[in-house]
Image (tube, grey):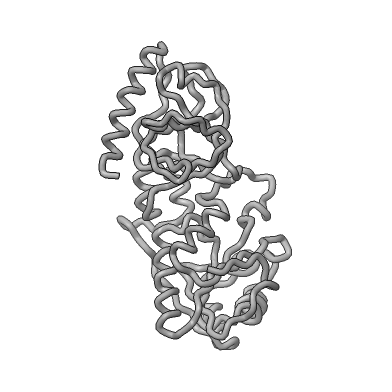
């Protein structure tokens, strides 16, 4: 997959089969669009292009609102799309100036002149252009003017609930990992770096790797204890993660830490990936350290059971 970070880097293609959007998380709904994108390109001898934007539009248009957390960093998205098999990934810098492009300017200057679009594949209820004013009907009208075809993908539903990145984010923040993973089509994952913590876990017999995220906008699931798979130094290990404020020790700082089963190596400052498979329980406050240790033993057995088929 070729990756471009500006329109100037991209040479228009002879037969570009294009889709565009933020594609946060590349969930099941996105995957349906990309499957259709690849099928059309193969049938027509074209090349697939995914046009996306960074930073996320909300980060630019609402700079004082830090509440938006994304399912994937831009590097994670690139890796994900490469694995799916997209030919070209065009990441345009999203600016206030860019946001003021009208629907027709976007089609004329970006899709046609910049990319060479012959087929545009869009999801259900797709909007584009300034203030998201461009509708599917307007796209069809512009397609006649600029000589390209529009293919619309119908809504991807699970239990009559339309999948969206927003719903997945809400599910993760609420601790509903099973719903989030179902909509994603894969277990949610987080990457970061191992940093020093209070080292209380070691005294309990459950040493933990404290994790600092590389991107402040990356979403961390809601507080609780999770069964996880950890990738460190290219190897997979089973473990359990705790997210929260460690109420037994009256901590105020929010922490994200992982106990890796059967692992004793020093890994400070190293890259780590945590894959969330099942939420085990809420974070709780215990009356004593012994009570916490006893619960951690139970959590370990529960995590091993949850991960038994992995």
- Residue 212 lies in quadrant: top right
Q: Position of residue 280 (x, y in %)?
A: 34, 33
Q: Residue at x 62, y 69 (%)?
A: 129
Q: In this rendering, would 303 be left or right of 46?
A: left
Q: Is residue 19 above or below residue 40?
A: above
Q: Is residue 56 above or below residue 109?
A: above
Q: Residue at x 34, y 39 (%)?
A: 278
Q: Position of residue 196 (x, y in %)?
A: 57, 27
Residue found at the far right of this picture: 97
Look at the image and tell me in which quarter the C terminus lies: top left
Please indicate, yes or no, whether residue 129 appears anywhere in the rendered image.
Answer: yes
Q: Residue at x 50, y 75 (%)?
A: 48
Q: Position of residue 58 (x, y in %)?
A: 62, 54
Q: How many callouts does the rendering have?
A: 0
- Residue 2 lies in quadrant: bottom right
Q: Position of residue 289 (x, y in %)?
A: 41, 13
In the image, 190 versus 287, the foreground residue is: 190
């Amino acid at each position: 997959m070729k990756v471009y970070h500006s329109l100037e880097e991209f040479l228009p293609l002879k037969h570009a089969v294009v889709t565009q959007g933020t594609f946060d998380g590349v969930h099941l709904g996105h995957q349906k669009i990309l499957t259709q994108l690849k099928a059309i390109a193969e049938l027509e001898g074209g090349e697939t292009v995914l046009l996306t934007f960074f930073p996320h539009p909300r980060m630019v248009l609402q700079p004082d609102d830090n509440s938006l957390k994304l399912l994937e960093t831009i590097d994670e998205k690139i890796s994900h799309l490469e694995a799916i098999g997209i030919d070209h990934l065009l990441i345009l810098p999203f600016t206030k100036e860019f946001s003021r492009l009208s629907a027709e300017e976007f089609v004329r200057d970006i899709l046609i002149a910049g990319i060479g679009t012959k087929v545009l594949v869009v999801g259900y209820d797709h909007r584009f252009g300034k203030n998201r004013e461009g509708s599917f009907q307007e796209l069809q009208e512009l397609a006649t003017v600029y000589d390209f075809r529009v293919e619309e993908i119908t809504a991807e539903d699970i239990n009559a609930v339309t999948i969206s990145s927003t719903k997945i984010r809400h599910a993760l923040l609420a601790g509903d990992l099973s719903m989030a993973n179902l909509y994603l089509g894969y277990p949610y994952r987080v990457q970061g770096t191992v940093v020093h913590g209070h080292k209380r876990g070691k005294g309990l017999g459950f040493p933990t790797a404290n994790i600092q995220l590389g991107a402040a906008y990356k979403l961390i699931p809601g507080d609780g204890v999770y069964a996880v798979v950890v990738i460190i130094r290219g190897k997979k290990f089973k473990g359990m993660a705790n997210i929260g404020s460690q109420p037994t020790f009256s901590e105020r700082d929010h922490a994200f830490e992982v106990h890796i089963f059967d692992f004793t190596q020093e890994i400070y400052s190293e890259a780590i990936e945590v894959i969330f498979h099942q939420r085990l329980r809420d974070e709780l406050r215990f009356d004593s350290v012994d009570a916490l240790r006893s619960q951690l033993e139970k959590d370990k057995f529960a995590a091993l059971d949850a991960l038994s088929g992995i």
